[in-house]
Amino acid sequence: MTKRLALWMLVGLAVIAFLALDLGHWLSFEYLQSQRATLVGYRDAHPFLCTAFFFALYVVATGLSLPGATVLTLAAGAIFGLLWATLLVSFASSLGATLAFLIARYLVRDPIQSRYGSRLQAIDAGIARDGAFYLFTLRLVPLFPFFVINLLLGLTAMRTRTFYWVSQLGMLPATLVYVNAGTQLGQLASPTGILSPQLLGAFALLGLFPLLARTLVARIRARRQYADFAKPKRFDRNLIVIGAGSAGLVSAYIAAAVKAKVTLIEAHRMGGDCLNTGCVPSKALLRAAKLAHELGRAEEFGFAAVQAVPDFARVMARVREVIRAVEPHDSVARYEALGVECLRGHARLVDPWTVEVDGQRLSAPNIVLATGARPFVPPLPGLAEAGYLTSDNLWELRELPPRLVVLGGGPIGCELAQAFARLGSKVTQVEMLPRLLIREDPEVSDTLQARFAAEGITVLLDTRAIRVEMIADQKTLICARAGQELRIPCDQILVAVGRAARLEGYGLEELGVKTGKTIEVNEFLQTSFPNIYACGDVAGPYQFTHTAAHMAWYCAVNALFAPLLRLRGGKFRVDYSVIPWATFTDPEVARVGLNETEAKARGIPHEVTLFPLADLDRAIAEGATEGFVKVLTVPGRDRILGATIVGAHAGELIAEFVLAMRQRIGLNKILGTIHIYPTLAEAGKYAAGRWKQAHQPAALLRWVARFHRWRRR
C-alpha cells in the first residue's frame, strides 16, 4: 500500500508540475514551428544526446498520459527525418504506452477488481480471447485517444507483452503519417489538417480487417466442421433435447412455453438423477435420520428418554413413497400437457441436426445435450469383485449395513455418512485430503468433523484407499495412512468421491464433439458444433440441480432465438457470478460467492464479519446454537463478496445473501430490513449489525457525544 501511495504521489506531482510550470507550451504546435531551426541545429551539434533526450521525453510524456504526443511525433519528423524518426517514435510510443498501461494496472486495477470483480470476469474472458484483435483495431483508428486505451486496458487481464507488441504494430501506420507530416512542418497550418476523412476511413477499414478476417476464418472452420454432413432442407422440430433431468426438463419447458415444437428424449426415468437417485431420495433419507437423532435428544427438551429404533426397510419404503409423490412434477403426462413431445428410448446423434431414437429419426436446427453425470468409481483393485454402493444403487438396500465405509469427504459422502450413522450403522469415513468439505473454509470442516465425532462417526483424513480384499466373505478396505497400512473390515463400501459427466454412448465421439472431463462449451453453451448446446452436469462447471436449470434457460433461448438475438448484438452469455450451494448435513453448510480461503488464494482484498448462532435467541430456544454466519465484504464498504452459513436451515437462510449479491444490496440494507423476532433469519441481520459496529464513524460519534453533553447543561 505504501509503494502504491508513493507512486500515486509521484504521478500526481509530475502532472501538477507540468500544469503549474506551464510546460505544455513547450509541446505546442506553434512553439515547434517557431523553434524548428534551433532544434535541427541542436541535433546536428549533439546527435546522440538529442536522440536520447527526445526518446526519454516521449516515453515519460506518454507514460504519464500528458498532452503533446501528437506534437512530439511531428517534432520527430521535423528533427530526425522520416526513417530515423519513425523508428524512434515507434519504440518510444510503445514503451510509453506500456508504462501507462502498467501504472494504471498497479494503481487502479485492484480497487476496481474488488468492487466490480464479477463484471470484470466476462471482460477479462473476452480480452483473453479477442483482446489482441480489439487493441489492434483501436490502435489503427486515431479517433480513439491512445492514452485512454492505455489506461483502460491496464484494468484488464491482458498480458503486458501482448499489449506491447500489438501497440508497436498497431500504432505504426499513424506514426508514419504524423512523422511524414512533421518532415513537411513548414507547410502545415495545424495538426488537425493531417488526417483527412478519407485517411481516417482507410485506417478504420484497416482496423476492422483483423476482426473481419477472424470472423471469416471462424466461418470457414465451421463450414469445414459441417462439410461431411448434409444439412436437411427442412426440419420436423425446432428443438431436440436429450436427457430429462433438471437441465433437459427446463430446456423443453421453455421451448414449449414459447410455442416451439420440441421433443424430449429420455432413456430411463423422467426427472433424471435428482428425482430418482439424488436430491429427492437423499433428502427423504436425511429427514428420517434427523428424526432418529432428535428422538435421541428427548431428555434435553424435558421428556423421558425415548428408545428410537429405526426400521430401515420402512425408512427406505418411505423414500420410495416420496419419490412417487414428487414424480408427477416431472412426469410425461405433465410435460405432454405443456406441449412437449416426450419419447422414451436411447438417443444417438446421427449428424449435427439429426437424432435417432430406437430406429426413428428426428431433425431440428438445434439440439440440447442434457445427459447429466454418474458416480465416479475409482479403479481400486478388488472393489468391483467385492461389490460396492454408489448414490445410484444404495436406494435398493433393504437392510441396514452394520458396518459401512464411506469413501469420500465431499458433500455426498458427508450427507450419507451422517444419515447411515444416525440410522444405526457403524460408519467409517475415508478421505485422502486433509479435511472434510475441502472447498469450504477450515472452520466449516472443523465444525462438521466435531459433530461427526460426537455422533460416533470415525473420520480418517489424509488416508488413501489402495485396495479391497475379500477374505471368507468378509470385505476389508486396505488404506495407506501416515506411511502405514490400515485395514478396515466392513459390510458395505459406499463410493462417494465425485461424479463424472456422461459422455459415452450417444454419438459424441463419432460426430466429433469436443470433450474433456465434460463437454466443452463456450460462454453461450455451444459445443464445437455451434447448433448443438450442452447444459447441466454434462457441461459443468457446477454439478447442482439449480445450476443445471439456470444453464438450461441460456441453452433454450440462445438456440431458439438465435436470428433475433443477432439484432441485440448476440446471444446471452451464461452468468455464473452468483451461484449458491448447500451441503445438507446437520448442521447444514450453505455458501454463495467467495469464502475466506478462496479470497486469500486469489489475493482479493476483503473483510470478514462473523456472527455465532450461539448469540441468536431463536437458535438458543431451538437448541441449535452450533454454527455461524460468516460474511466477506469489500474493505471499508458493505458490498458482499460472499457468505457462508453453518447451522440449522442454512440452505434456507443463505437465500437472503444470494438475493443481496444478485441485486447488489449491501449489509446496510440488510440491517435496515425488518426481520421477524425470534427467527433464525435474524442471523443475517445480526451479522450485518456486527459489520456496522466495526465501521462506526468514530469522529462523528465524538461530536455527537459533545452535542449531548451540551444539551445536559
Image: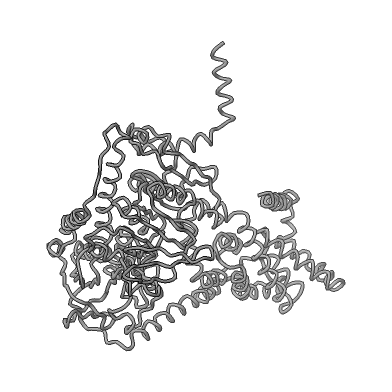
Quarter assignment of residue 92: bottom right
Residue 373 in view, yes or no? no
Q: Residue furthest right?
A: 45
Q: Is residue 409 left or right of residue 483?
A: left
Judged left or right of residue 517, residue 326 is left
From the viewer's side, name the closer residue of 72 and 578: 578
> Looking at the picture, does residue 323 appear above or below residue 376?
above
Residue at the image point whose x is 56% and y is 66% from the top: 158
| Residue 125 location (% of width, % of height) | 48, 66
Residue 199: percent from the left, percent from the top?
Answer: 55, 74
Is 627 in front, or is 636?
A: 627
Q: Position of residue 100 (x, y in %)?
A: 64, 61
Left or right, 156 with reference to 289: right
Outermost top residue? 713
As drawn, 463 above or below 669 = below
Report the residue at 82% width, 71% height from top. Answer: 43
Q: Quadrant of residue 400?
A: bottom left
* Quadrant of the rendering where the C terminus is positioned: top right
Viewer-proximal residue among 399 and 268? 399
